Image (spheres, rainbow, N blue to C red):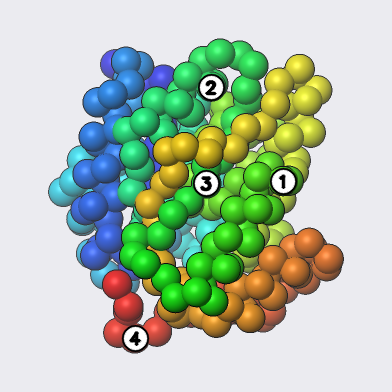
Amino acid sequence: MPCSYSIVIPAYNEESHLPATLASAHAAMRMVSEPGEIVVVDNNSTDRTAAVARENGARVVFEPINQISRARNAGAKAAGGAWLVFLDADTQLPPGLLVRAIENLRSGKIAGGGALMEMDRPLEPRLQRVINGWTWVSRKLQWAAGSFVYCTREGFDAVGGFSQKVYAGEEVFFSHAYTKWAKRQGQRFCIVESPRVLTSARKLEWYSPAQLLGLLVLMTLCPMAVRSKRLCSFWYRRPKPELN
């Protein structure tokens, strides 16, 4: 049966997080009347990411170059849905959020958007301030977080997908380009405020608030800087062993 929407999950060494993420996606899909699919992009993993994805009911495609933008685009290229939902591999999808996103796309008034997020554990005050700051920016500027982005296939193709010129913040560049495209169609880009996606707090533990805020400043004041793989290298490094 042809699918109406595709959930695309980029994954690099995510065997530990994928089972919960995929379980949440399957549960959310049962609340939507249209048929859908899950596409996991194995972004050159060295663990059992691909096997775990298949074991948990996802179709798997492979992207050999370790770059988030490329993984997202590879998944979109392989996806069969007219509507695309991008979900991070360490993020759980509430059923109500998928329902809301599909309703928005079905309405014809909203071309896509994102969602606010909450962490999967309590945060110390300085880290919570980072999240609060992003929430304010997301609401104010209508920027989607990479943990959850939804759009139409038509719009995705029209803006060229996620920029492969950048190594971080690709969802912000996508939000900006997609918002302009949506306006030309008489539609808008909508950040869903409730329910929120539940995402892992591990990146807040891997990296300092200064690094995370520095990335936001780079994207805002000097967007060309995120074209440098060297300047964004911390975004691709993981401590060993991984903090779950």
Pointer 3 and pointer 2: residues touching (CB < 8 Å)?
A: no
Pointer 3 and pointer 1: residues touching (CB < 8 Å)?
A: no
Give the mark, 3 or 2, whose residue is nearer the N terminus. Answer: 2
For the residue pair 148 and 48, the one nearer the viewer reads as 148
Q: Secondary structure at mark 2?
A: helix
Q: Disc 4 vs disc 3: which is toward the camera?
A: 3
Q: Residue at x 62, y 58 (%)?
A: 134
Q: x%, y% of residue 125? A: 50, 74
Q: Disc 4 vs disc 2: which is toward the camera?
A: 2
Q: Secondary structure at mark 3?
A: strand
Residue under numbered circle 1 = 140
Q: Residue at x 83, y 67 (%)?
A: 222
Q: Residue at x 76, y 30 (%)?
A: 181
Residue under numbered circle 4 = 240
What's the mark number on residue 104? 2
Q: Is residue 205 left or right of residue 140?
A: left
Give the mark, 3 or 1, whose residue is nearer the N terminus. Answer: 3
Circle 3: residue type: Leu
Circle 1: residue type: Lys
Pointer 4 and pointer 3: residues touching (CB < 8 Å)?
A: no
Q: Is residue 122 something one can see in this rendering?
A: yes
Give the mark, 4 or 3, whose residue is nearer the N terminus. Answer: 3
**Mark 4 surroundings within 10 Å by alpha-carbon count, few (fewer than 14), some (14 through 19), many (20 or more):** few
As measured in the structure, the alpha-carbon distance from the residue carrying label 2 to the one carrying label 1 is 20 Å
Residue 82 in the image: above or below residue 211 = above
Image quadrant in which the C terminus is located: bottom left
Residue under numbered circle 3 = 116
Q: Secondary structure at mark 1?
A: helix
Circle 2: residue type: Asn
Residue 230 in the image: above or below residue 3 = below
